[in-house]
Image (tube, rainbow, N blue to C red):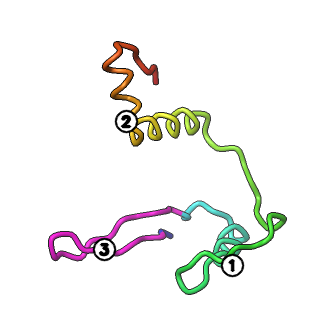
Amino acid sequence: MLVVEGYRENGKVKHRTLLNISKWKDNQIEAFRKLLKNGEIVYTSLKEISVSEGKKIGGIYTCNEIAKRLGLSKLFEESKLTLMI
């Protein structure tokens, strides 16, 4: 099961996958459905949200992406410093 977004690019309709929930448990999918209402996120109590540890590379990847988006990676290149990822 996929959560997708429809958009147009150069007049053509395209779809972008936002989230793959195929491997989620039924109770996780139901909780996610409760968060969504008419395509908008409905805020809920923190007690209803469960958190689980993801892959260890996630933090490093996230920091790298933030650095790229903020242009920090260019600063490191200019100063001849390297981000080791």
Callout 3 crowding tier (Cα within 10 Å): few <14, some 14–19, many ≥20: few
Residue ID at (80%, 64%):
46
Instruction: Please state the horizontal and vertical placement of residue 8, each as a whole percent of the image.
Output: 24, 74
Most common secondary structure along the magenta stretch: strand
Rounded to the nearest angstrom, the CA distance separating label 2 from label 3 is 27 Å
Q: Position of residue 44 (x, y in %)?
A: 75, 73
Compare residues 5 and 80 and report the one nearer the observer: 80
Q: Quadrant of residue 45?
A: bottom right
* Image-quadrant location for residue 41: bottom right
Circle 3 residue: 7
- Dot in front, 3 or 1: 3
Q: Secondary structure at mark 3?
A: strand
- The residue sitting at the left extreme is 10
Left or right, 1 with respect to 77, comes to: right
Residue 25 screen position, x and y as percent: 68, 65
Q: Earlier in the sequence, mark 2 or mark 1?
A: 1
| Residue contact between numbered discs 2 and 1, judged by CB atoms under 8 Å | no
Q: Amino acid at mark 1?
A: Lys
User: Is-magenta flag for residue 34?
Assistant: no
Which span of residues is magenta-colored?
Answer: 3-20
Q: Which residue is mark 1?
A: 34
Q: Secondary structure at mark 1?
A: helix
Hey, what amino acid is under mark 2? Gly
Q: Which residue is mark 2?
A: 71
